[in-house]
Amino acid sequence: EAIRVADLAHQMSLKSNEIIKVLFNLGVMATINSSLDLDTATLVASEFGYEVEKVGFSEENYLVPAEIDSPESLLPRPPVVTIMGHVDHGKTSLLDAIRKTSVTSGEAGGITQHIGAYHVKTKRGDIVFLDTPGHEAFTAMRARGAQVTDLVVLVVAADDGVMEQTREAINHSKAAGVPILVAVNKIDKESANPDRVLQELASLGLQAETWGGDTVVGYVSAKTGQGLDELLELIALQAEILELKANPNKPARGRVVEAKLDKGRGPVATVLIQEGTLKQGDAFVCGVFAGRVRAFFNDQGKKVKEAGPSIPVEIQGFDGVPEAGEEFICLADEKAARRIAESRAIKQREKELAKQSRVTLETFLASTPNDSEAKVLNLVLKADVQGSLEAITDALVKLGTDKVRISVIHSGAGAITETDIMLAAASHAIILGFNVRPTAKVKEVAEREGVDIRFYDIIYKLVEEIKSAMAGMLAPVS
Ligand code: GDP
Protein backbone atom coordinates (compact mmCIF):
# COMPACT_ATOMS: atom_id res chain seq x y z
CA GLU A 1 0.00 0.00 0.00
CA ALA A 2 1.60 3.23 -1.12
CA ILE A 3 0.66 6.68 -2.30
CA ARG A 4 2.58 8.95 -4.62
CA VAL A 5 3.80 12.30 -3.33
CA ALA A 6 1.82 14.06 -6.05
CA ASP A 7 -1.39 12.21 -5.12
CA LEU A 8 -0.96 12.90 -1.42
CA ALA A 9 -0.38 16.58 -2.17
CA HIS A 10 -3.47 16.62 -4.32
CA GLN A 11 -5.58 15.05 -1.55
CA MET A 12 -4.56 17.85 0.82
CA SER A 13 -4.75 20.59 -1.81
CA LEU A 14 -1.04 21.31 -1.40
CA LYS A 15 1.82 21.69 -3.81
CA SER A 16 4.08 18.64 -4.07
CA ASN A 17 7.03 20.82 -3.15
CA GLU A 18 5.60 21.50 0.29
CA ILE A 19 5.44 17.78 0.93
CA ILE A 20 8.91 17.19 -0.43
CA LYS A 21 10.21 19.86 1.96
CA VAL A 22 8.60 18.19 4.97
CA LEU A 23 9.95 14.84 3.84
CA PHE A 24 13.41 16.37 3.53
CA ASN A 25 13.17 17.62 7.11
CA LEU A 26 12.25 14.09 8.14
CA GLY A 27 15.35 12.87 6.38
CA VAL A 28 13.56 11.37 3.38
CA MET A 29 14.70 12.37 -0.09
CA ALA A 30 11.69 12.28 -2.36
CA THR A 31 10.47 13.50 -5.71
CA ILE A 32 7.00 14.19 -6.95
CA ASN A 33 6.77 10.59 -8.22
CA SER A 34 8.11 8.85 -5.12
CA SER A 35 5.82 6.41 -3.38
CA LEU A 36 5.32 6.80 0.34
CA ASP A 37 4.34 3.92 2.58
CA LEU A 38 1.41 4.23 4.94
CA ASP A 39 3.53 5.22 7.95
CA THR A 40 5.45 7.93 6.14
CA ALA A 41 2.33 9.29 4.52
CA THR A 42 0.60 9.42 7.92
CA LEU A 43 3.53 11.28 9.40
CA VAL A 44 3.65 13.84 6.60
CA ALA A 45 -0.09 14.34 6.60
CA SER A 46 -0.13 14.96 10.34
CA GLU A 47 2.31 17.84 9.79
CA PHE A 48 -0.47 19.51 7.84
CA GLY A 49 -3.22 18.50 10.24
CA TYR A 50 -4.55 15.64 8.12
CA GLU A 51 -5.11 12.01 8.88
CA VAL A 52 -4.44 9.26 6.40
CA GLU A 53 -7.15 6.70 6.09
CA LYS A 54 -6.47 3.40 4.42
CA VAL A 55 -9.18 2.79 1.87
CA GLY A 56 -9.72 -0.07 -0.52
CA PHE A 57 -8.80 0.46 -4.12
CA SER A 58 -11.71 1.67 -6.13
CA GLU A 59 -11.91 1.36 -9.88
CA GLU A 60 -14.12 4.40 -10.06
CA ASN A 61 -11.24 6.61 -8.98
CA TYR A 62 -9.40 5.68 -12.15
CA LEU A 63 -12.03 4.75 -14.64
CA VAL A 64 -14.11 7.63 -15.81
CA PRO A 65 -17.59 6.28 -16.48
CA ALA A 66 -18.59 6.22 -20.11
CA GLU A 67 -19.44 9.84 -20.79
CA ILE A 68 -22.84 10.82 -21.97
CA ASP A 69 -22.12 12.04 -25.46
CA SER A 70 -23.69 15.22 -26.69
CA PRO A 71 -25.98 14.66 -29.68
CA GLU A 72 -23.59 16.65 -31.93
CA SER A 73 -20.70 14.32 -31.09
CA LEU A 74 -22.58 11.25 -32.31
CA LEU A 75 -21.81 10.14 -35.85
CA PRO A 76 -23.34 7.30 -37.89
CA ARG A 77 -21.66 3.91 -37.51
CA PRO A 78 -22.06 0.64 -39.42
CA PRO A 79 -24.48 -2.01 -38.12
CA VAL A 80 -23.15 -5.13 -36.42
CA VAL A 81 -24.99 -8.24 -37.59
CA THR A 82 -25.22 -11.79 -36.22
CA ILE A 83 -26.51 -14.61 -38.39
CA MET A 84 -28.73 -17.14 -36.65
CA GLY A 85 -30.84 -20.09 -37.66
CA HIS A 86 -31.31 -23.84 -37.51
CA VAL A 87 -28.37 -26.16 -38.12
CA ASP A 88 -27.74 -26.80 -41.84
CA HIS A 89 -29.97 -23.95 -42.97
CA GLY A 90 -26.90 -22.23 -44.41
CA LYS A 91 -25.52 -19.78 -41.82
CA THR A 92 -21.88 -20.56 -42.57
CA SER A 93 -22.45 -20.69 -46.32
CA LEU A 94 -24.17 -17.31 -46.20
CA LEU A 95 -21.37 -15.74 -44.15
CA ASP A 96 -18.83 -17.08 -46.64
CA ALA A 97 -20.82 -15.95 -49.66
CA ILE A 98 -21.19 -12.44 -48.24
CA ARG A 99 -17.52 -12.27 -47.44
CA LYS A 100 -16.72 -13.11 -51.05
CA THR A 101 -18.96 -10.39 -52.47
CA SER A 102 -17.29 -7.84 -50.24
CA VAL A 103 -15.51 -5.06 -52.06
CA THR A 104 -12.72 -5.04 -49.49
CA SER A 105 -11.72 -8.64 -50.06
CA GLY A 106 -10.84 -7.66 -53.61
CA GLU A 107 -8.38 -5.06 -52.39
CA ALA A 108 -4.81 -5.53 -53.42
CA GLY A 109 -2.76 -7.42 -50.89
CA GLY A 110 -5.77 -8.24 -48.79
CA ILE A 111 -6.10 -11.82 -47.67
CA THR A 112 -9.18 -12.57 -45.68
CA GLN A 113 -8.32 -13.48 -42.13
CA HIS A 114 -10.70 -15.14 -39.73
CA ILE A 115 -10.56 -12.80 -36.78
CA GLY A 116 -14.10 -13.38 -35.50
CA ALA A 117 -15.79 -10.56 -37.38
CA TYR A 118 -15.56 -8.94 -40.76
CA HIS A 119 -16.42 -5.78 -42.48
CA VAL A 120 -18.07 -5.51 -45.89
CA LYS A 121 -18.62 -2.45 -48.02
CA THR A 122 -21.88 -2.26 -49.93
CA LYS A 123 -23.29 0.39 -52.18
CA ARG A 124 -25.53 1.47 -49.33
CA GLY A 125 -22.85 1.52 -46.68
CA ASP A 126 -20.68 -0.66 -44.52
CA ILE A 127 -21.88 -3.69 -42.58
CA VAL A 128 -20.01 -5.69 -39.95
CA PHE A 129 -20.75 -9.40 -39.52
CA LEU A 130 -19.85 -11.43 -36.47
CA ASP A 131 -18.24 -14.63 -37.63
CA THR A 132 -19.63 -17.01 -35.05
CA PRO A 133 -23.15 -17.72 -36.19
CA GLY A 134 -25.91 -18.96 -33.95
CA HIS A 135 -27.69 -17.91 -30.84
CA GLU A 136 -25.39 -19.87 -28.50
CA ALA A 137 -22.44 -17.50 -28.96
CA PHE A 138 -24.77 -14.51 -29.05
CA THR A 139 -26.35 -15.35 -25.70
CA ALA A 140 -23.09 -16.46 -24.10
CA MET A 141 -21.77 -12.96 -24.86
CA ARG A 142 -24.93 -11.41 -23.51
CA ALA A 143 -24.59 -13.36 -20.28
CA ARG A 144 -21.25 -11.54 -19.86
CA GLY A 145 -23.10 -8.25 -20.29
CA ALA A 146 -21.98 -7.77 -23.88
CA GLN A 147 -24.58 -6.65 -26.34
CA VAL A 148 -22.79 -6.03 -29.61
CA THR A 149 -25.35 -7.15 -32.17
CA ASP A 150 -27.58 -4.47 -33.69
CA LEU A 151 -29.46 -6.73 -36.04
CA VAL A 152 -30.07 -10.47 -36.31
CA VAL A 153 -30.33 -12.09 -39.73
CA LEU A 154 -32.43 -15.21 -39.25
CA VAL A 155 -31.62 -17.80 -41.89
CA VAL A 156 -34.44 -20.21 -42.71
CA ALA A 157 -33.97 -22.84 -45.38
CA ALA A 158 -36.79 -22.60 -47.89
CA ASP A 159 -36.99 -26.38 -48.24
CA ASP A 160 -37.04 -27.09 -44.52
CA GLY A 161 -38.94 -24.24 -42.90
CA VAL A 162 -39.02 -23.18 -39.27
CA MET A 163 -37.32 -25.70 -36.98
CA GLU A 164 -36.51 -25.97 -33.28
CA GLN A 165 -33.39 -23.78 -33.45
CA THR A 166 -35.20 -21.23 -35.59
CA ARG A 167 -37.66 -20.81 -32.74
CA GLU A 168 -34.81 -20.65 -30.25
CA ALA A 169 -33.04 -17.99 -32.29
CA ILE A 170 -36.21 -15.91 -32.42
CA ASN A 171 -36.68 -16.15 -28.65
CA HIS A 172 -33.04 -15.35 -27.93
CA SER A 173 -33.16 -12.29 -30.22
CA LYS A 174 -36.41 -11.12 -28.68
CA ALA A 175 -35.04 -11.56 -25.15
CA ALA A 176 -32.14 -9.33 -26.18
CA GLY A 177 -34.42 -6.80 -27.83
CA VAL A 178 -32.57 -7.08 -31.14
CA PRO A 179 -34.56 -6.66 -34.35
CA ILE A 180 -34.76 -9.63 -36.72
CA LEU A 181 -34.44 -9.62 -40.49
CA VAL A 182 -35.29 -12.89 -42.23
CA ALA A 183 -33.19 -14.45 -44.98
CA VAL A 184 -35.05 -17.27 -46.71
CA ASN A 185 -32.13 -19.35 -47.99
CA LYS A 186 -31.73 -22.20 -50.51
CA ILE A 187 -34.23 -20.68 -52.94
CA ASP A 188 -32.29 -22.40 -55.73
CA LYS A 189 -33.65 -25.74 -54.56
CA GLU A 190 -36.49 -27.39 -56.37
CA SER A 191 -38.21 -28.21 -53.11
CA ALA A 192 -38.03 -24.60 -51.91
CA ASN A 193 -41.30 -23.29 -50.52
CA PRO A 194 -40.80 -19.70 -49.34
CA ASP A 195 -44.51 -19.16 -48.76
CA ARG A 196 -44.61 -21.92 -46.22
CA VAL A 197 -41.68 -20.30 -44.42
CA LEU A 198 -43.51 -16.96 -44.25
CA GLN A 199 -46.58 -18.69 -42.91
CA GLU A 200 -44.64 -20.49 -40.18
CA LEU A 201 -42.84 -17.28 -39.23
CA ALA A 202 -46.12 -15.38 -39.05
CA SER A 203 -47.44 -17.92 -36.57
CA LEU A 204 -44.42 -17.04 -34.40
CA GLY A 205 -45.14 -13.34 -34.54
CA LEU A 206 -42.84 -12.44 -37.42
CA GLN A 207 -45.22 -11.16 -40.06
CA ALA A 208 -43.56 -10.36 -43.37
CA GLU A 209 -43.90 -6.86 -44.80
CA THR A 210 -45.49 -8.28 -47.94
CA TRP A 211 -48.14 -9.75 -45.68
CA GLY A 212 -48.83 -6.46 -43.92
CA GLY A 213 -46.42 -7.01 -41.04
CA ASP A 214 -43.12 -5.30 -40.30
CA THR A 215 -40.60 -8.12 -40.74
CA VAL A 216 -38.20 -7.55 -43.61
CA VAL A 217 -37.56 -10.68 -45.66
CA GLY A 218 -34.81 -11.35 -48.21
CA TYR A 219 -34.66 -14.36 -50.53
CA VAL A 220 -31.23 -15.81 -51.18
CA SER A 221 -29.16 -18.72 -52.29
CA ALA A 222 -25.85 -18.91 -50.51
CA LYS A 223 -24.92 -21.49 -53.10
CA THR A 224 -25.54 -19.54 -56.32
CA GLY A 225 -25.22 -16.06 -54.86
CA GLN A 226 -28.72 -15.16 -55.99
CA GLY A 227 -30.29 -12.37 -53.92
CA LEU A 228 -27.13 -11.63 -51.95
CA ASP A 229 -26.82 -8.01 -53.07
CA GLU A 230 -30.46 -7.44 -52.30
CA LEU A 231 -30.03 -8.98 -48.85
CA LEU A 232 -27.09 -6.68 -48.09
CA GLU A 233 -29.16 -3.75 -49.28
CA LEU A 234 -32.03 -4.76 -46.98
CA ILE A 235 -29.63 -5.01 -44.05
CA ALA A 236 -28.17 -1.58 -44.80
CA LEU A 237 -31.64 -0.11 -45.15
CA GLN A 238 -32.80 -1.64 -41.90
CA ALA A 239 -29.68 -0.25 -40.21
CA GLU A 240 -30.47 3.22 -41.50
CA ILE A 241 -33.82 3.01 -39.74
CA LEU A 242 -32.08 2.09 -36.49
CA GLU A 243 -30.01 5.31 -36.72
CA LEU A 244 -26.95 3.72 -35.18
CA LYS A 245 -24.53 6.29 -33.85
CA ALA A 246 -21.45 6.60 -31.69
CA ASN A 247 -18.89 9.22 -30.72
CA PRO A 248 -15.60 8.43 -32.48
CA ASN A 249 -13.70 11.29 -30.87
CA LYS A 250 -12.66 9.85 -27.55
CA PRO A 251 -10.65 6.95 -26.14
CA ALA A 252 -11.93 3.63 -27.46
CA ARG A 253 -14.24 1.20 -25.72
CA GLY A 254 -15.33 -2.11 -27.15
CA ARG A 255 -15.98 -5.78 -26.56
CA VAL A 256 -13.85 -8.84 -27.08
CA VAL A 257 -15.31 -11.04 -29.80
CA GLU A 258 -12.64 -13.71 -29.79
CA ALA A 259 -9.25 -14.20 -28.15
CA LYS A 260 -6.46 -16.71 -28.28
CA LEU A 261 -2.85 -17.37 -27.43
CA ASP A 262 -0.88 -17.15 -30.65
CA LYS A 263 2.38 -19.07 -30.79
CA GLY A 264 4.38 -16.25 -32.33
CA ARG A 265 2.50 -13.18 -31.21
CA GLY A 266 1.36 -14.00 -27.70
CA PRO A 267 -2.17 -13.17 -26.55
CA VAL A 268 -4.27 -11.60 -29.31
CA ALA A 269 -7.90 -10.56 -29.13
CA THR A 270 -10.40 -9.38 -31.67
CA VAL A 271 -12.16 -6.38 -30.26
CA LEU A 272 -15.21 -4.80 -31.77
CA ILE A 273 -14.85 -1.09 -31.11
CA GLN A 274 -18.16 0.33 -29.90
CA GLU A 275 -17.25 3.94 -29.27
CA GLY A 276 -14.22 6.18 -29.54
CA THR A 277 -11.22 5.51 -31.75
CA LEU A 278 -8.44 3.04 -31.07
CA LYS A 279 -4.87 4.17 -31.67
CA GLN A 280 -1.54 2.46 -31.41
CA GLY A 281 0.06 2.91 -28.00
CA ASP A 282 -3.25 3.32 -26.15
CA ALA A 283 -3.23 1.86 -22.64
CA PHE A 284 -6.17 -0.38 -21.88
CA VAL A 285 -7.81 -2.64 -19.35
CA CYS A 286 -9.84 -5.66 -20.37
CA GLY A 287 -11.28 -7.84 -17.64
CA VAL A 288 -8.43 -8.89 -15.40
CA PHE A 289 -5.85 -8.02 -18.04
CA ALA A 290 -4.19 -4.78 -19.02
CA GLY A 291 -1.69 -3.61 -21.56
CA ARG A 292 -0.76 -1.19 -24.23
CA VAL A 293 -1.92 -1.53 -27.84
CA ARG A 294 1.23 -2.71 -29.61
CA ALA A 295 -0.27 -3.23 -33.02
CA PHE A 296 -3.65 -3.98 -34.52
CA PHE A 297 -4.90 -5.51 -37.73
CA ASN A 298 -8.12 -5.50 -39.70
CA ASP A 299 -9.96 -8.49 -41.16
CA GLN A 300 -7.66 -8.37 -44.18
CA GLY A 301 -4.68 -8.96 -41.94
CA LYS A 302 -3.47 -5.44 -42.62
CA LYS A 303 -1.94 -3.28 -39.97
CA VAL A 304 -4.13 -0.27 -39.34
CA LYS A 305 -3.49 2.99 -37.55
CA GLU A 306 -6.97 3.79 -36.31
CA ALA A 307 -10.24 1.96 -35.74
CA GLY A 308 -13.51 3.67 -34.94
CA PRO A 309 -17.00 2.52 -33.86
CA SER A 310 -18.27 -0.88 -35.14
CA ILE A 311 -14.87 -1.81 -36.57
CA PRO A 312 -13.40 -5.18 -35.57
CA VAL A 313 -9.64 -5.31 -35.08
CA GLU A 314 -7.22 -7.91 -33.83
CA ILE A 315 -5.11 -6.37 -31.09
CA GLN A 316 -1.69 -7.35 -29.75
CA GLY A 317 -0.44 -6.14 -26.42
CA PHE A 318 -2.50 -8.07 -23.87
CA ASP A 319 -0.79 -9.57 -20.84
CA GLY A 320 -3.21 -12.51 -20.88
CA VAL A 321 -6.03 -13.98 -22.95
CA PRO A 322 -9.31 -12.21 -22.16
CA GLU A 323 -12.71 -13.89 -22.37
CA ALA A 324 -15.15 -13.28 -25.19
CA GLY A 325 -17.65 -10.61 -24.22
CA GLU A 326 -15.21 -8.83 -21.91
CA GLU A 327 -15.26 -5.04 -22.03
CA PHE A 328 -12.18 -3.38 -23.50
CA ILE A 329 -11.51 0.13 -22.20
CA CYS A 330 -8.75 2.51 -23.20
CA LEU A 331 -7.52 4.97 -20.64
CA ALA A 332 -4.81 7.54 -20.44
CA ASP A 333 -2.61 5.95 -17.83
CA GLU A 334 -1.12 2.48 -18.19
CA LYS A 335 -0.38 2.26 -14.47
CA ALA A 336 -4.02 2.89 -13.69
CA ALA A 337 -4.96 0.20 -16.21
CA ARG A 338 -2.73 -2.30 -14.42
CA ARG A 339 -4.09 -1.29 -11.04
CA ILE A 340 -7.66 -1.85 -12.19
CA ALA A 341 -6.80 -5.21 -13.72
CA GLU A 342 -5.10 -6.31 -10.48
CA SER A 343 -7.97 -5.24 -8.30
CA ARG A 344 -10.38 -7.08 -10.59
CA ALA A 345 -8.32 -10.22 -10.38
CA ILE A 346 -8.49 -10.06 -6.59
CA LYS A 347 -12.23 -9.47 -6.67
CA GLN A 348 -12.70 -12.33 -9.09
CA ARG A 349 -10.93 -14.71 -6.76
CA GLU A 350 -13.09 -13.52 -3.88
CA LYS A 351 -16.19 -14.01 -5.95
CA GLU A 352 -15.20 -17.51 -6.91
CA LEU A 353 -14.93 -18.28 -3.25
CA ALA A 354 -18.38 -16.98 -2.48
CA LYS A 355 -20.45 -18.08 -5.43
CA GLN A 356 -23.85 -16.52 -5.41
CA SER A 357 -26.94 -17.18 -7.41
CA ARG A 358 -28.16 -14.48 -9.74
CA VAL A 359 -31.84 -15.07 -9.24
CA THR A 360 -33.57 -17.79 -7.33
CA LEU A 361 -37.24 -18.14 -6.69
CA GLU A 362 -36.59 -17.31 -3.04
CA THR A 363 -34.72 -14.10 -3.74
CA PHE A 364 -36.96 -12.99 -6.55
CA LEU A 365 -39.48 -11.22 -4.39
CA ALA A 366 -37.02 -9.97 -1.86
CA SER A 367 -34.78 -8.59 -4.57
CA THR A 368 -36.47 -5.37 -5.56
CA PRO A 369 -38.27 -3.00 -3.25
CA ASN A 370 -41.99 -2.70 -3.67
CA ASP A 371 -42.68 0.03 -6.14
CA SER A 372 -45.44 0.90 -8.49
CA GLU A 373 -43.96 -1.01 -11.41
CA ALA A 374 -44.81 -4.66 -11.77
CA LYS A 375 -41.96 -7.10 -11.28
CA VAL A 376 -41.37 -9.55 -14.06
CA LEU A 377 -40.50 -13.15 -13.29
CA ASN A 378 -38.65 -14.43 -16.35
CA LEU A 379 -38.92 -18.16 -16.93
CA VAL A 380 -37.34 -20.65 -19.29
CA LEU A 381 -39.52 -23.71 -19.53
CA LYS A 382 -38.40 -27.14 -20.72
CA ALA A 383 -40.63 -30.20 -20.78
CA ASP A 384 -40.52 -33.70 -22.18
CA VAL A 385 -43.41 -33.16 -24.56
CA GLN A 386 -44.98 -30.24 -26.40
CA GLY A 387 -48.40 -30.86 -24.83
CA SER A 388 -47.15 -30.27 -21.29
CA LEU A 389 -45.42 -27.08 -22.39
CA GLU A 390 -48.64 -25.57 -23.59
CA ALA A 391 -50.59 -26.60 -20.50
CA ILE A 392 -47.91 -25.23 -18.18
CA THR A 393 -47.46 -21.96 -20.08
CA ASP A 394 -51.21 -21.34 -20.00
CA ALA A 395 -51.40 -22.00 -16.29
CA LEU A 396 -48.37 -19.83 -15.54
CA VAL A 397 -49.41 -16.84 -17.58
CA LYS A 398 -52.75 -16.85 -15.80
CA LEU A 399 -50.94 -16.44 -12.48
CA GLY A 400 -49.75 -12.97 -13.46
CA THR A 401 -50.98 -10.12 -11.28
CA ASP A 402 -50.62 -6.34 -11.19
CA LYS A 403 -47.56 -6.75 -9.03
CA VAL A 404 -45.85 -9.71 -10.64
CA ARG A 405 -45.92 -10.47 -14.30
CA ILE A 406 -44.85 -13.89 -15.59
CA SER A 407 -42.86 -13.93 -18.79
CA VAL A 408 -41.95 -17.25 -20.40
CA ILE A 409 -39.04 -16.03 -22.49
CA HIS A 410 -38.37 -19.42 -23.99
CA SER A 411 -39.99 -22.81 -23.92
CA GLY A 412 -39.15 -25.99 -25.71
CA ALA A 413 -39.53 -29.73 -25.63
CA GLY A 414 -36.40 -31.63 -24.71
CA ALA A 415 -33.55 -31.64 -22.24
CA ILE A 416 -32.21 -28.52 -20.58
CA THR A 417 -29.17 -27.39 -22.56
CA GLU A 418 -26.22 -25.12 -21.91
CA THR A 419 -27.81 -22.57 -24.23
CA ASP A 420 -30.93 -22.52 -22.03
CA ILE A 421 -28.68 -21.73 -19.08
CA MET A 422 -26.90 -18.91 -20.88
CA LEU A 423 -30.24 -17.45 -21.93
CA ALA A 424 -31.46 -17.63 -18.33
CA ALA A 425 -28.24 -16.06 -17.07
CA ALA A 426 -28.43 -13.25 -19.61
CA SER A 427 -32.09 -12.57 -18.90
CA HIS A 428 -32.07 -13.13 -15.14
CA ALA A 429 -34.49 -15.99 -15.59
CA ILE A 430 -35.24 -19.15 -13.68
CA ILE A 431 -35.41 -22.48 -15.48
CA LEU A 432 -38.32 -24.83 -14.88
CA GLY A 433 -37.88 -28.42 -15.96
CA PHE A 434 -40.89 -30.66 -16.29
CA ASN A 435 -40.15 -34.38 -16.56
CA VAL A 436 -36.63 -33.54 -17.72
CA ARG A 437 -33.26 -33.78 -16.01
CA PRO A 438 -30.04 -31.92 -16.74
CA THR A 439 -26.78 -33.63 -17.57
CA ALA A 440 -23.89 -33.31 -15.15
CA LYS A 441 -22.25 -30.84 -17.51
CA VAL A 442 -25.34 -28.66 -17.66
CA LYS A 443 -25.63 -28.73 -13.86
CA GLU A 444 -22.07 -27.52 -13.65
CA VAL A 445 -22.70 -24.63 -16.06
CA ALA A 446 -25.85 -23.66 -14.14
CA GLU A 447 -23.86 -23.56 -10.95
CA ARG A 448 -21.10 -21.51 -12.52
CA GLU A 449 -23.55 -19.04 -14.01
CA GLY A 450 -25.65 -18.94 -10.86
CA VAL A 451 -28.83 -20.02 -12.58
CA ASP A 452 -31.63 -21.57 -10.55
CA ILE A 453 -33.15 -24.71 -12.09
CA ARG A 454 -36.23 -26.34 -10.61
CA PHE A 455 -37.69 -29.71 -11.46
CA TYR A 456 -41.22 -30.94 -11.36
CA ASP A 457 -43.21 -33.94 -12.46
CA ILE A 458 -46.66 -32.74 -11.56
CA ILE A 459 -48.05 -29.60 -13.21
CA TYR A 460 -50.11 -28.76 -10.18
CA LYS A 461 -46.99 -28.71 -7.97
CA LEU A 462 -45.12 -26.49 -10.39
CA VAL A 463 -47.94 -23.98 -10.55
CA GLU A 464 -48.38 -24.00 -6.79
CA GLU A 465 -44.71 -23.34 -6.22
CA ILE A 466 -44.60 -20.40 -8.60
CA LYS A 467 -47.75 -19.06 -6.99
CA SER A 468 -46.15 -19.28 -3.55
CA ALA A 469 -43.00 -17.63 -4.83
CA MET A 470 -45.09 -14.80 -6.17
CA ALA A 471 -46.77 -14.43 -2.84
CA GLY A 472 -43.37 -14.38 -1.21
CA MET A 473 -44.18 -17.41 0.88
CA LEU A 474 -41.91 -19.95 -0.67
CA ALA A 475 -40.12 -22.17 1.78
CA PRO A 476 -36.45 -22.52 0.91
CA VAL A 477 -35.63 -25.69 -0.97
CA SER A 478 -33.68 -28.19 1.03
P1 GDP B 1 -25.17 -24.03 -41.08
O1 GDP B 1 -25.16 -25.27 -40.25
O2 GDP B 1 -26.43 -23.24 -40.87
O3 GDP B 1 -23.95 -23.18 -40.94
O4 GDP B 1 -25.28 -24.52 -42.61
P2 GDP B 1 -24.15 -24.64 -43.72
O5 GDP B 1 -23.77 -23.31 -44.23
O6 GDP B 1 -23.07 -25.52 -43.20
O7 GDP B 1 -24.95 -25.37 -44.87
C1 GDP B 1 -25.49 -26.67 -44.71
C2 GDP B 1 -25.60 -27.35 -46.05
O8 GDP B 1 -26.51 -26.67 -46.91
C3 GDP B 1 -24.29 -27.41 -46.80
O9 GDP B 1 -24.17 -28.65 -47.42
C4 GDP B 1 -24.41 -26.30 -47.82
O10 GDP B 1 -23.66 -26.56 -48.98
C5 GDP B 1 -25.89 -26.30 -48.12
N1 GDP B 1 -26.39 -24.99 -48.54
C6 GDP B 1 -26.22 -23.82 -47.87
N2 GDP B 1 -26.82 -22.81 -48.53
C7 GDP B 1 -27.38 -23.35 -49.63
C8 GDP B 1 -28.16 -22.83 -50.73
O11 GDP B 1 -28.46 -21.63 -50.81
N3 GDP B 1 -28.59 -23.70 -51.66
C9 GDP B 1 -28.29 -25.03 -51.59
N4 GDP B 1 -28.76 -25.81 -52.57
N5 GDP B 1 -27.57 -25.56 -50.60
C10 GDP B 1 -27.11 -24.74 -49.63
Image (spheres, helix red, strand yellow):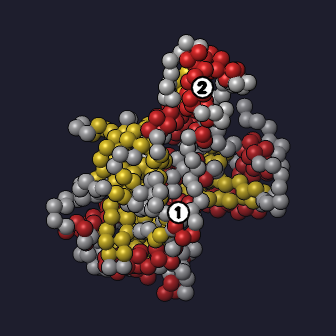
Task: Measure the alpha-carbon separation of dots 2 and 1.
Answer: 58 Å
The residue that disc 1 covers is 173
Residue pictured at 69% horizontal, 20% vertical:
47
Could you tell me residue 115's position as x and y percent?
Answer: 31, 53
Vertical arrangement, residue 399 with respect to residue 351, above or below: below
Kindly identify the amino acid type of the residue bearing the numbered disc 1. Ser
Residue pictured at 55% horizontal, 12% vertical:
27
Mark number, residue 350: none
Vertical arrangement, residue 330 with respect to residue 167, above or below: above
Foreground mark, 2 or 1, reads 2
Q: Quadrant of ligand 1?
A: bottom left
Residue pictured at 73% horizontal, 35% vertical:
477
Q: Which of the 4 quarters of the picture holds residue 309?
A: bottom left
Could you tell me residue 426's position as x and y percent?
Answer: 57, 51
| 79 relative position to 397: left or right | left
Residue 109 makes an appearance in the image = yes
Could you tell me residue 329's position as x and y percent?
Answer: 47, 47
Kindly identify the amino acid type of the residue bearing the numbered disc 2. Ile
The residue tagged with tag 1: helix, strand or loop? helix
Q: Residue furthest top?
A: 27
Quarter of the image that includes the N terminus: top right
Quarter of the image that includes the C terminus: top right
